[in-house]
Structures are given as C-alpha cells and as structure tokens.
Amino acid sequence: MPLSIYDQIWIADGSTLEALFRKLKSLEDLKAGQLAGKICTVIDLVTRLPIEVWFHTNPAASETNFEVPLLNLLSAKTLILLDRGFYHFHFFQQLIDQEVHFITRLKAKAAIKYLKIFSYDHLVKDRLIQLGTVRRDAPVLTLRLIEIKIGKTSYSYITSVLDPHILPPYAVADLYGRRWRIEEAFYSVKRLLGLSYLWTGSVNGIKLQVWATWLF
C-alpha cells in the first residue's frame, strides 16, 4: 500500500472533560457535576503519542471551534482521520487547499452526485462523487465515497484521496477503524493517569493538569 507518500497519519478528536472534583474548599460553591471543559487532541496513528492538545472552557463546544488551530498545525502530505464532529464543507475545502488529505464518515441525507465508478459489487462500492449543493456559500466537493458491507452492516466513508490505487477501499475502512486509537488514548489519560479527577477550578490550573497529564 503506497501510504509512504504521506509524511504522517494523524487522528483528531474532541473529548469532554469530567466534572470538577469538589473536595477543595475553593470549589465548594460550584454546582455539582460542573464539567471542566473540552479538549481536542491530535495523536500520531503509529506511535499513539500526542502531537497537540487544545482546551476550550465550554464543555459543549463543537469540534468546529478547533478547526483554525488544526489547520495551522497540519502540513501538506498529512493524512488525517476525523470524526463527524469536523464535518464541515469549508473546513474540508481548506484541508484540500493545503494538500492535506482526510478520511471521515459520511453523514445521512448527504447531497451526492455520482461522477465515476471505480468498483461496484454487493460488498464494495467505490465511486467518485460531488458532495453538497450550491447554497449558503458552501463549496461543492469532489471526493471518493467508499461503501463497504461487513456482515449485515454497511459503512460509508468519504476521502479526499481520489486515486484508489493510492488508497484502496479496504485500506480506507481499515484506517478509519484505527481512529479508535484516540479513544484508547483518551481512556489512558483519563482513567489510568488521573485526568478524570480535576482538582482546580481555575482555567489555568485545568490547562496545567491537562497538558502535564498528556506530557506524562
């Protein structure tokens, strides 16, 4: 598989932090269950080590709040795996303009125009598509749609890698399946390294604990 054309394969995802631990006197007046905020982390698929971590004070913040720093971080010849929190056509276009490639899941009821068939049978459908319609200034994107049936379940992926020789259909599905490595990383820092217990109520204190835990 010619994945060597990419300098790195990264995963980006957001995760809501746990409730503040209210045993400190300075936190006694906080309402029970108040969440500490939200982080967005980029990890390397191969090493599982963090590349960058960002923090937002609003625990309900959308992943779109992290698009600008993510775009500033990414360089050409990067392949990034994204969850559907980053499903935003302008963001996709900016990635393509920066020569950054991505894989993500297709959302339901997407407006699709089929342009070309690369492969098509009852298990695998690989097609070139236009995604989106001209409205609200959103770009219409030329992408690949890969639909794979495993057992009785069908999975739909979109990628900006338009050449199936570079990224065959099952490679797309396999890579996206490995996106769950970031969930394992979140589990490690929260449960094993203690990030699920946030002892301070100050933003600076939370940031220090978040970054120190990820560094460790």
Image (tube, rainbow, N blue to C red):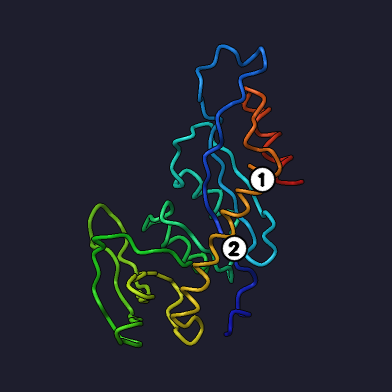
Query: Where residue 95 sits in the image (x, y, percent)?
Result: 48, 62
Instruction: Indicate the position of residue 209 as horizontal and vertical percent values.
Output: 70, 34
Cβ atoms at labels 2 and 1 below 8 Å apart:
no
Residue drawn at (59%, 63%) of the image: 10
**Disc number placed over residue 48 in the picture, else none:** none
Sequence-wise first label, 2 or 1 = 2
Apparent side of residue 114 relative to residue 77 in the rendered image (left or right): left
- Pointer 1: residues within 10 angstroms few (<14), some, or many (20+)? some
The three-letter amino acid code for the residue at tag 1 is: Val
In the rendered view, tell whether residue 23 sits above or below residue 181: above
Mark 2 or mark 1, whichever is nearer to me: 1
Front-most of residues 51 and 72: 51
Circle 2: element type: strand
What percent of the width, then of the height, locates residue 50? 67, 54
Disc number for residue 10: 2
Q: Which residue is mark 1?
A: 189
- The residue located at (48%, 67%) in the rendering is 102
Residue depicted at x 61% and y 16%: 27
Q: Secondary structure at mark 1?
A: helix
Compute the Cα span from label 2 to label 1: 18 Å
Total count of labels? 2
